[in-house]
Amino acid sequence: MSQRFVRWFETWIEEKIPPGANSDIESHEVRAKRLTEQLFAEAAAAGFSKYETDEERERIPPRVLAAVTDSTDFDVDAYYLKAQLARENEDGD
């Protein structure tokens, strides 16, 4: 298992599939399959070898599907506000 590739695809999933950003246009399975294909295409373009990506080919699709089906709403404004307040109060909460 390539740790470099694992870190890369975890970051890719976080950046490309935000929580709660699901559309009604395509099903979760279709969207997950499309994004998985896009992930592997971008991995090849990023310079990962076929060996590195083939090792993870079984583990990635379920993780992409889990990210796609996540219906958690994430309030970006509240996150930034909490971060700003934590910096001002210097308590980290």
Image: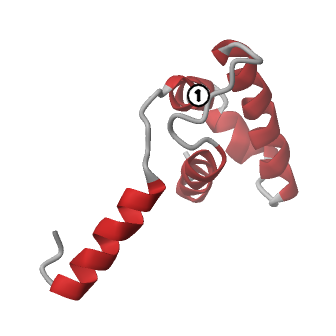
Q: Quadrant of the N terminus?
A: top right
Q: Nearer the viewer, residue 67 or 24?
A: 24
Q: Relative to the observer, which residue lies in front, 61 or 49?
A: 61
State the quadrant of the C terminus. Answer: bottom left
Secondary structure found at label 1: helix
In the rendered image of this protein, does residue 87 appear above or below residue 29?
A: below
Q: Is residue 6 left or right of residue 38?
A: left
Depth check, front residue: 44 or 18: 18
Q: Residue at x 62, y 28 (%)?
A: 22
Percent from the top left, x then y, of residue 58? 61, 24
| Horizontal and vertical percent position of residue 4 | 58, 59
Q: Is residue 40 above or below residue 92?
A: above
**To which quarter of the image does residue 54 belong?**
top right
Residue 27 relative to residue 50: left or right: left
Q: Residue furthest left?
A: 91
Which residue lies at the image location 61% right of the left edge and 56% below the top edge?
A: 8
The 10 Å Cα crowd at callout 1, few under 14, some 14 to 19, many 20 or more, is: many
**What colour scheme does the image use?**
secondary structure
Q: How many marks?
A: 1
Residue type (three-letter) at the residue carrying disc 1: Val
Which residue occupies the foreground of this view, 10 or 6? 10
Q: In the shown orientation, is residue 91 left or right of residue 13? A: left
* Residue at 74% from the left image edge and 43% from the top image edge: 51
Relative horizontal placement of residue 44, taking residue 82 as reference (left or right): right
In this rendering, is residue 5 above or below 24? below
Q: Where residue 12 sits: x, y (%)?
A: 64, 51
* Residue topped by disc 1: 68
Q: Can you tell which quarter of the image residue 68 is in?
A: top right
Identify the residue at horizontal 43%, vertical 45% (top origin): 74
